[in-house]
Amino acid sequence: MIFFHKIIKRYSKEDIWLYHELKKTLKLSPSKINLYKKAFTHRSFQITDSKGILINYERLEFLGDSILDAVISDYLYKQAPRGTEGYLTQIRSKIVSRKHLNELGKDLDLIRFVKSKVTSTQVGDNIHGNIFEALLGAIYLDKGYKGCQKFIHQNVIIPYVDIEKLEGKITSYKGLIIEWCQKQKKKYKFETYEDSGNELVKHFSVKISIDGELIAKGRATSKKKAEELASKRVYFAFQKKINMG
């Protein structure tokens, strides 16, 4: 009991709260709480260590991204023995897509742990995926590869990875259209321009032409969204031909 109280005195109330919340949320017991604190520190917080190096989640995010790729690659290699390099890469990209990582971060409600001087709406939606990857980096440094692999298996692979369903999932209509046009030796053209109209929010419009013929248009609040919308319309216009290769 005396030993336990000595340990408690080494940590702040904030550290103890974070420890218990992570244990409850992640189903693991953090050993190096400072790693997890770093994983949830946004660069806007502007704090440094004793060497003057900024403390934030970006380096852990880089590490976690690499570990996630390695674990998913290992899983797919074993589960899809007939899969080619291109096939395995495509399936992996669907699992580790930014959209999916953002969903994982939201599901775990990791944003509540983040220290930042800007609001979550200001930093954008991708912060959810970024801190999920940073968390993986912290788990790897705290629990080793096997511990991180177990966490990814329980929180990513078991609940979300269904290879058969992923085979039919389209993550980028634009990429799909470009790939199909290149295979079919067709000339494609994306024309993008600002189209604010009478609205306060800036909009972008996109026109997609194939072999000189206008096929579809798209309009949205970002260039990327407009391109995806127009590409999706092209996909449904040529769906049978695209699915046939």
Image (cartoon, rainbow, N blue to C red):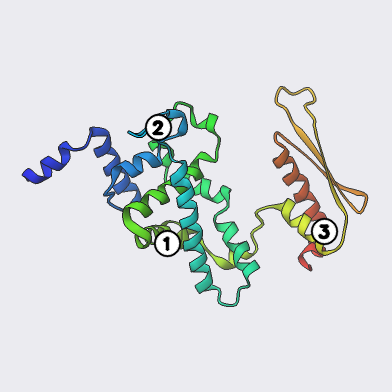
Task: Please tell me whether residue 113 is drawn above or below residue 3 in the rendered image.
Answer: above
* Residue drawn at point x = 80 percent, y = 25 percent: 197
Task: Give the structural element (helix, strand or loop) at label 3.
Answer: helix
Which is nearer the eye, 51 or 14?
Answer: 51
Q: Earlier in the sequence, mark 1 or mark 3?
A: 1
Q: Mark number for residue 181?
A: 3
Q: Is residue 107 visible?
A: no
Task: Please tell me whether residue 153 is drawn above or below residue 108 in the rendered image.
Answer: below
* Residue drawn at point x = 15 percent, y = 36 percent: 9
Q: Position of residue 118 (x, y in %)?
A: 48, 27
Discs 2/1, front: 2
**Left or right side of 142 for 73:** right
Distance Cα–Cα, label 2 vs label 1? 28 Å
* Residue drawn at point x = 87 percent, y = 62 percent: 185
Mark 2 surroundings: few (<14), some (14-19) or many (≥20) residues within 10 A: some
Distance Cα–Cα, label 2 vs label 3? 46 Å
Report the amino acid beneath label 3.
Answer: Cys
Task: Please tell me whether residue 57 is drawn above or below residue 70 in the rendered image.
Answer: above
Q: Mark number for residue 153?
A: 1
Residue tagged 2: 115
CB-based contact (under 8 Å), mark 1 and mark 3 = no
Report the amino acid beneath label 2.
Answer: Lys
Task: Please tell me whether residue 156 is drawn above or below residue 47 in the rendered image.
Answer: below
Q: Earlier in the sequence, mark 2 or mark 1?
A: 2
Which is nearer the eye, 229 or 142?
Answer: 142
Distance Cα–Cα, label 1 vs label 3? 37 Å
Q: The C terminus is located in which quarter?
A: bottom right
Q: Position of residue 161 (x, y in %)?
A: 51, 62
Task: Give the structural element (helix, strand or loop) at label 2.
Answer: loop
Task: Give the structural element (helix, strand or loop) at label 1.
Answer: helix
